[in-house]
Amino acid sequence: MIGNAISLAAAGFMASSCLVKNSRAIFICQFLECVLLAVSSVFFGSLAGTAVLAVSALRNLLVAAGRYPKKLMYLFVLATAVLGIWVNTKGLIGLLPVAATVEYTVCCYYIKGLKATRYSIFINVAIWVIYSFCIFDFSTALTDSAVLLVDAAAIVKLYRREKREKAPEGTGPLPQ
């Protein structure tokens, strides 16, 4: 019950990260989300989740501050993989947080645009949804499923805006 309540609060920050308009704000929201989810993972007995979320929180803080060079990205990938595998008590399911965190850790370095960041978030959250259902963290699973929908809507909105901006003059809808 306590873990689900904390996860619900964390979901608010994840949803916020899908709505903000710049990358720095995305990573600040995700820093707060990771801190709360790391705490909630303790209540679910997920040591792998706790470990990779703590590493993710630090990574998100560094990305938000603009202090995330390639060497740190490699260090975070290595730390996530080693720590996540070492403390994993859930078998193959316990590797999902590791995979999700490695994916996003690499993307945090290489991806610079808002649209690509949103795609990466979508993939990451989808993996976490599966994991959350598997460990019975229904609060996170359901709220992250909603976040997937919010993120998908944000991606579509961004795509439409880019398409409108690229359309040659005179090809848009007729004025009414």
Image (cartoon, rainbow, N blue to C red):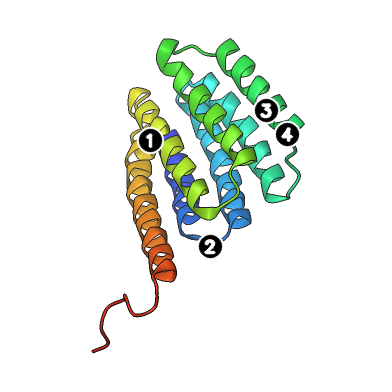
Q: Residue at x 52, y 23 (%)?
A: 98
Against 119, residue 92 (above or below) is above
In the visual, does 112 lie left or right of 127?
right
Q: Is residue 39 visible?
A: no
> Could you say which quadrant of the image residue 70 lies in?
top right
State the residue position of label 1. 126
Q: Does dot 3 land on a helix, a strand or a loop?
A: helix
Quadrant where the C terminus is found in the figure: bottom left
> Could you say which quadrant of the image residue 128 lies in?
top left
Looking at the rendered image, the disc whose residue lies closer to the viewer, 2 or 4, is 4
At label 3, the amino acid type is Phe
At label 1, the amino acid type is Ala
Q: How far is disc 1 from disc 2 in space, using C-alphas?
A: 21 Å
Q: How far is disc 3 from disc 4 in space, using C-alphas?
A: 10 Å
At label 2, the amino acid type is Lys
State the residue position of label 2. 21
- Sequence-first tag of 2 and 4: 2
State the residue position of label 4. 70
- Label 3 Cα crowd, 10 Å radius (few <14 / some 14-19 / many 20+): many
Q: How far is disc 2 from disc 4 in space, using C-alphas?
A: 25 Å
Q: Position of residue 66 (x, y in %)?
A: 73, 49
- Sequence-first tag of 3 and 4: 4
Q: Does dot 2 land on a helix, a strand or a loop?
A: loop
